[in-house]
Image: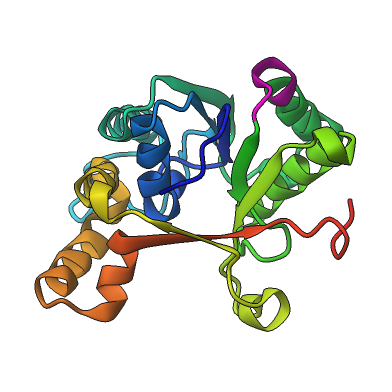
Amino acid sequence: MIEQENHVLVIFPHPDDEAFGVSGTITSYIKQGTPLTYACLTLGEMGRNLGKPAFATRETLPEIRRSELQKAAKAMGIQDLRMLGLRDKTLEFEDDEKMTQIVRNLIQELQPSLVISFYPGYAVHPDHEATARAVVRALGEIEPSKRPKLHALAFANNTDENLGEPDVHNDIRAVQEEKLNAMRAHISQTARMLEMLDEGIKANDPEAMKWVTSERFYTYKWDKHPV
């Protein structure tokens, strides 16, 4: 059973960031009746997959990915989806205060008890890292006794060595189909991976089954990684 929260705020930079690592957890919270907001900072318009033969151009891809994100949100049951309109692959160049203020505004409005995002230093992509830093800066301004929890995804090569085992393991077997549907919604970017995943699930491959049975997070260590 996933722990009950007052409000969950999910913040990621790209459409599909939520689908792979968090969609089962999102669906579980929503099914429990927990209010949940997903703030997606960009439309992923610089996504690498335009198709072979091409099904999109740089001009048309943003609307395709907007539609896919809306379909994914519907698959998970999200009713409060915020598309914030920043430009893909440029978040590392945005003003730090601007990025922090975006997160600060969301926290002040929603008063979440839990924030889900990336773990700074362990999120690999520059947009992921910029998002994670903004989340940590905004949360770090809040008095510790009133600060929402931060559950963070981390998948850099040195994650296990430096952070150890994830602190949170959410059993998502009951919402496996919702997770797969959220991933399928982002078909422009996920077609090949979904094909491989479906094959692995049919073969009961342990690596494939991890994707649809459990989602893992690190609780942010404020004492070890201060703002």
Give the residue displayed 68% in from the left and 84% down from the top: 161
Residue situated in front as seen by the camera: 197 or 162: 162
Q: Position of residue 227 (x, y in %)?
A: 89, 51
100 on left or right of 210: right
Q: Residue at x 9, y 71 (%)?
A: 202
Residue 33 is situated, as x and y percent measured from the top left of the image, at 40, 26
Check the image and tell me how it is coloured.
Answer: rainbow
Q: Quadrant of residue 163?
A: bottom right
- The mark total stands at 0
Looking at this view, name the residue that lies furthest to the top.
109
* Residue sitting at the far bottom: 161
Residue 220 x/y as whole percent: 72, 56
Image height of 81 relative to 96, above or below:
above
Q: Let me know if residue 209 appears in the view.
A: yes
Looking at the picture, does residue 54 appear above or below residue 159? above
Question: In x, y percent, where is residue 131?
Answer: 67, 44
Residue 60 lies within the magenta run: no
* Above or below 119: residue 142: above
Q: Which residues are magenta?
A: 107-112
* Front one among 150 and 187: 150
Q: Main secondary structure of the magenta part?
A: helix
Residue 95 in sight in this render: no
Answer left or right for 44 relative to 187.
Answer: right
Residue in front for this viewpoint, 66 or 220: 220
Taking the magenta stretch, the answer to whether it contains residue 111 is yes
Residue 138 against residue 120 in the figure, above or below: above
> Which residue is at the far left?
202
Q: Nearer the viewer, residue 194 or 163?
A: 163
